Amino acid sequence: MMRLPALALASLATAGCMYSAARPTQAELQVIAEPAQARVYIDERFAASARVLARRPRKLRPGRHRLTFQAPGYFPHDVLVDLPPGRTTVRISLRPVPP
């Protein structure tokens, strides 16, 4: 009779070990930029405007990525980022070209 409770307890323990909290496996890049119409390139490919990436973050593989920001009347800016799994927000203000 002691075998049934021990077996049930072993089954519960095994089931508990198989459960793991869902961890994000992808990186999400959100961009908040000034000016909002700045064009954002990820790894030298156009991704979207900063305005779009502020509302809809881009899913990427975790790791190092090169971001380039460009807007008319502003100096371009490059940033290397190491994106971990989950959401990362990059905030940037481009410097205006003097008149």
Image (cartoon, rainbow, N blue to C red):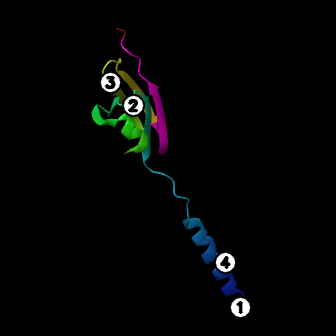
Residue 84 visible, this orientation: no
Residue 70, by quadrant, is top left
Crowding around mark 4 (Cα neighbors within 10 Å: few <14, some 14 to 19, many 20+) is few
Task: Kindly report which numbered mark, 2 or 1, lies closer to the viewer in this rendering.
Answer: 2
Q: Nearer the viewer, mark 2 or mark 4?
A: 2
Distance from disc 2 to disc 1, alpha carbons, whole Å, reads 71 Å
Q: Which residue is mark 2?
A: 36
Label for residue 9? Answer: 4
Q: Percent position (x, y) of residue 52? A: 37, 40
Which is nearer the N-term, disc 3 or disc 1? 1
Q: Is residue 72 above or below residue 17?
A: above
Callout 2: SS = loop
Q: Amino acid at mark 4?
A: Leu
Q: CA distance from mark 1 to mark 4?
A: 14 Å
Task: Identify residue type, mark 2.
Answer: Ala
Between discs 2 and 3, the one toward the N terminus: 2
Q: Residue furthest right?
A: 2
Q: Secondary structure at mark 4?
A: helix
Using the numbered discs, state the Cα–Cα distance from disc 2 to disc 3 in whole angstroms. 9 Å
Question: Residue 43 colored magenta?
Answer: no
Q: Nearer the viewer, residue 50 or 60?
A: 50
**Element on which disc 1 rests:** loop
Q: In 3D space, how far apart are the residues under numbered discs 3 and 1 (Cα atoms)?
A: 76 Å
Query: Looking at the rendered structure, which numbered label has been put on residue 71?
Result: 3
- What span is colored magenta in the figure? 83-97
Residue 24 is situated, as x and y percent measured from the top left of the image, at: 48, 51
Residue at 41 percent of width and 28 percent of height:
80
What amino acid type is highlighted by mark number 1?
A: Met
